[in-house]
Image (cartoon, rainbow, N blue to C red):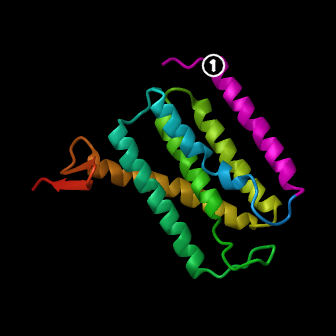
Amino acid sequence: MIITHVFLRKIVIALMMTMCAVTSSAQQTYHGDGPDDWLRYIPLASAITLKACGVEGKSSWKRFIVNGALSCAITTGTTWALKATIDERRPDWTDKRSFPSGHTSIAFAGATILDKEFRQVSPWIGVAGYAVATGVSEDRVLRNRHHWQDVTAGAAIGVGGTILGYWLGDKLTGEHSRYSVGIGGEGVTVLVRL
């Protein structure tokens, strides 16, 4: 499948317009859930959609699933472990789970997966993913749900967790790996060649 620059430009413009609308509406909403609740999943959903539509990514389906799952597990595990141990009150005083931002870490993990998989198709795909993730971060701060340090840490955890997830996944499923991972109807099988 060939993606033209015109098509990619339209995608990026649409994502930027969406983020402008989200952040302007976010300034009017003080408490509660907002568009960031579903926007945080857009970068990862975009990676899966592009792969499912036949856009040639960097990885096979097996590598994509293993590395993506490890990246998300590391990101969410780290985020929630820190939330449970660090008692930082949110700016709106609703609870003490402000640091780090979970919405931001998920959004940046998805954006990094999107960039790693489809950068060779066009660098604008990664730019669009990071633009959405940045918009999610900005929305969290504008709606008084997080401090800037919370979203900065969340972004670092998302990017770092994905880099670590891809490194570990390649150790498990790489070309010269001693490990073989299979996914079937009965679960996940891991074989180790001795």
In the depicted structure, whether residue 167 falls above or below residue 144: above
Which three-letter amino acid code belongs to the residue tagged 1? His
Residue 140 occupies quadrant: bottom right
Residue at 48% across / 40% down in the picture? Answer: 116
Residue 44 occupies quadrant: top right
Percent position of residue 97, x then y: 66, 75
In the depicted structure, whether residue 133 falls above or below residue 119: below
Label 1's element?
A: helix
For this view, does 172 lie left or right of residue 155?
A: left
Residue at 82% across / 59% down in the picture? Answer: 142
Callout 1: 10 Å neighbours few (<14), some, many (20+)? few
Residue 61 on the magenta span: no
Residue at 69% across / 72% down in the picture? Answer: 98
For this view, does 1 lie left or right of residue 136?
A: left
Residue located farthest toward the left when viewing the structure as drawn:
194
Percent position of residue 96, x then y: 69, 80
How many marks can you see?
A: 1
Residue located farthest toward the front when viewing the structure as drawn:
185
Residue 5 on the magenta span: yes
For the record, the magenta segment spans 1-28
Residue 42 or residue 135, whichever sits in front: 42
Question: What is the magenta segment's predominant secondary structure?
Answer: helix
For this view, does 39 lie left or right of residue 82?
A: right
Residue 191 or residue 34, whichever sits in front: 34
Percent position of residue 156, x then y: 58, 58
Q: Is residue 115 visible?
A: no
Q: Is residue 193 visible?
A: yes
Q: Quadrant of the C terminus?
A: bottom left
Residue hosting label 1: 5
Percent position of residue 79, x then y: 55, 67
